[in-house]
């Protein structure tokens, strides 16, 4: 059996290697199932072309990854494949939250809820017959969205998943890298863990991983970094973990091993929790060659942070930025405008906080109420496939007293005020590359 693993093409500001398809591919191949990855996003392929490639590759079935922002294109592709007699399975965050509706709209044979490796492997070994595989659903075993579902059996020991870079070349993903700065190309992306132990209400991770965290062994992570450098000519590495600093001893050991074995610069670009770091950690990061970490600040108002269960305060953020500065590291902050309780005043506080905090980079987003997040339930959101955005830039939830225009205007103002300062321009000058500049300009002018 041969399975085509597909990432569909949507408009997006960043483009990373499809790690999800990579892990599925290498895990299946480890167990004797042939796969081919079709990255339609990377090559801008339309659905007809994807189908043509599937036929040329003589794949027996297709697996499509689906985040909420990708839903309509995924359904269109799945319908097309279905019409052409190709079996389809859809996995990822969106079908995990809405398995029934995904099956109805997409006409896919199956959806997989939760992590896909084991369930997809079983499905392939069963020649796409579902004999009660945990986490695999078709319309035969789901009555509606309220039907109880179980998540697929995850791979407990993540070291058992081979490195994905035999199937994906990092050099193919230079044009829109993750994070706003980088020193050298090509960049390799690594995840040392899966899951997060926290419960921020705007985030889908707690639902997807049920609050459980699994870490790879530091030795396995180092081996992947070496593979990327020696075999893929990678010259910088970015970690994409939810919070790689969750366990202090783990990160300290990882830093020690990186310092002993790895000579390329690296960064924690998806973010560390401010409360997970202290001076010992920041000193170790620096010593090991990490030049940048970002923190999820979200808001400059403690009442808002409390209401979204962030379990951190603005004082924690200031402490983290101060440590970053002490060790000469570039520190970025992620912000969200339009959280519940937001007013014009709180948005202005956030801008002031970002500017006063001594952060080097600020990423100002508009709240996207994500399926799977606690906010989705709290705000009684309903999924509307005719109203999908994928840029954290179009408000769909409006706090009392705020209009869409207020929020968008504030986002623009924040970008201009933050980056319009000479000291920030000076600090970011050494990292000046076309791609992040285009990113900021696109965000300002696409409004
Ligand atoms: C890295 C990352 C990115 C990267 C790359 C994503 C990619 N794959 O192309 C970038 C920065 C580009 C990105 C972009 C976006 N992201 Co993002 N991202 C992540 C992050 C931090 C890690 C994802 C990852 O690679 N994990 C590692 C792999 C191995 O795990 P996985 O993707 O979950 O895949 C497993 C299962 O989901 C399942 N599965 C996935 N695909 C498939 C396919 C098949 C066939 C099967 C069977 C199973 C299956 O099996 C996989 C292996 O176990 C997650 C947070 C998180 N912790 O998951 C958010 C996350 C996935 N992103 C999210 C969002 C919202 C986005 C954006 C829409 C943001 C935006 N507005 O721009 C865009 C999407 C645009 C796009 N298509 O590129 C949300 C998704 C929520 C939702 N309901 O859809 C998440 C959960 C974070 C959050 N805020 O809650 N993202
Ligand atoms: S925002 Fe970060 S810390 Fe909060 S739940 Fe999500 S991954 Fe965890």
Image (cartoon, rainbow, N blue to C red):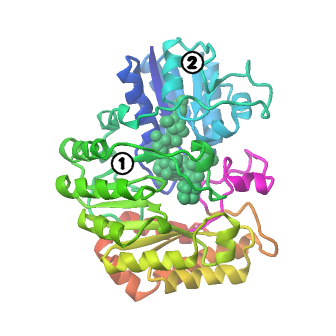
**Circle 2 SS class:** loop
* Label pair 1/2, CB-CB below 8 angstroms: no
Quarter of the image for residue 351 reads: bottom right
**Circle 1 SS class:** strand
The x and y percentages for residue 49 are 49, 31
Quarter of the image for residue 330 reads: bottom left
Residue for badge 1: 190
Q: Quadrant of the N terminus?
A: top left
Q: Nearer the viewer, mark 1 or mark 2?
A: 1
Q: Is residue 173 magenta?
A: no
Q: Quadrant of the C terminus?
A: bottom right
Kindly tell me whether residue 69 is visible in this rendering: no
Apparent side of residue 354 relative to residue 29 in the rendered image (left or right): right
Against 419, is 179 above or below? Answer: above
- Count of picture labels: 2
The x and y percentages for residue 87 are 58, 19
Against 141, is 198 above or below? Answer: below
* Residue at 22 percent of width and 45 percent of height: 226
Mark 1 surroundings within 10 Å by alpha-carbon count, few (fewer than 14), some (14 through 19), many (20 or more) = many
Segment colored magenta: 364-392
Kindly tell me whether residue 139 is visible in this rendering: yes
For the stretch drawn in magenta, the main secondary structure is: loop
Any mark on residue 86, and which?
2
* Residue at 46 percent of width and 55 percent of height: 14
Against 279, is 194 above or below? Answer: above
The single residue placed furthest to the front in the displayed view is 249
Mark 1 or mark 2: which comes first in sequence?
2
Apparent side of residue 34 relative to residue 12 in the rendered image (left or right): left
């Amino acid at each position: 059996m041969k399975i085509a693993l597909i990432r569909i093409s949507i408009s997006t500001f960043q483009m990373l290697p499809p790690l999800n398809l990579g892990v599925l591919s290498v895990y299946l191949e480890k167990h004797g199932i042939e796969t081919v990855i079709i990255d339609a996003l990377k090559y801008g392929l339309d659905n007809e072309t994807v189908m043509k490639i599937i036929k040329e590759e003589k794949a027996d079935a297709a697996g499509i990854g689906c985040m909420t922002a990708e839903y309509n294109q995924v359904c269109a592709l799945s319908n097309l494949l279905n019409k052409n007699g190709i079996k389809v399975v859809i996995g990822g965050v969106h079908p995990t939250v809405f398995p029934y509706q995904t099956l109805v709209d997409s006409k896919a044979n199956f959806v997989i809820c939760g992590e896909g490796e084991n369930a997809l492997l079983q499905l392939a070994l069963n020649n796409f017959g579902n004999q009660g595989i945990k986490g695999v659903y078709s319309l035969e075993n789901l009555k509606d969205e309220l039907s109880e579902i179980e998540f697929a059996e995850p791979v407990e020991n993540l070291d058992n998943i081979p490195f994905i870079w035999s199937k994906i070349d990092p050099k193919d993903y230079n044009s829109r890298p993750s994070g706003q700065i980088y020193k050298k190309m090509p960049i390799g992306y690594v995840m040392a863990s899966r899951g997060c132990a926290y419960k921020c209400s705007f985030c889908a991770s707690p639902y997807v991983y049920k609050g459980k965290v699994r870490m790879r062994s530091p030795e396995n992570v180092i081996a992947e970094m070496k593979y990327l450098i020696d075999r893929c000519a990678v010259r910088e590495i970015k970690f994409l973990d939810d919070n790689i600093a969750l366990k202090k001893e783990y990160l300290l050991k990882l830093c020690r091993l990186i310092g002993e074995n790895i000579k390329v610069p690296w960064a924690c670009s998806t973010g560390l929790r401010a409360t997970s770091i202290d001076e010992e950690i920041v000193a170790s990061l620096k010593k090991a060659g990490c030049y940048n970490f970002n923190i999820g600040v979200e808001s400059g108002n403690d009442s808002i942070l409390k209401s979204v269960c962030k379990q951190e305060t603005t004082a924690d953020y200031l402490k983290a930025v101060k440590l970053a500065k002490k060790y000469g590291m570039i520190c970025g902050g992620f912000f969200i405008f339009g959280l519940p309780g937001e007013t014009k005043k709180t948005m202005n506080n956030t801008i002031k906080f970002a500017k006063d905090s001594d952060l080097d980079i600020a990423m100002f987003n508009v709240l996207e109420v994500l399926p799977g997040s606690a906010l989705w339930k709290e705000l009684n959101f309903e999924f509307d496939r005719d109203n999908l955005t994928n840029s954290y830039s179009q408000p769909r939830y409006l706090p009392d007293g705020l209009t869409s225009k207020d929020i968008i205007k504030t986002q623009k103002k924040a970008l201009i005020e933050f980056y319009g300062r000479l000291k920030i321009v000076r600090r970011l000058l050494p990292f000046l590359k076309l791609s992040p500049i285009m990113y900021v300009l696109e965000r300002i002018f696409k409004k």
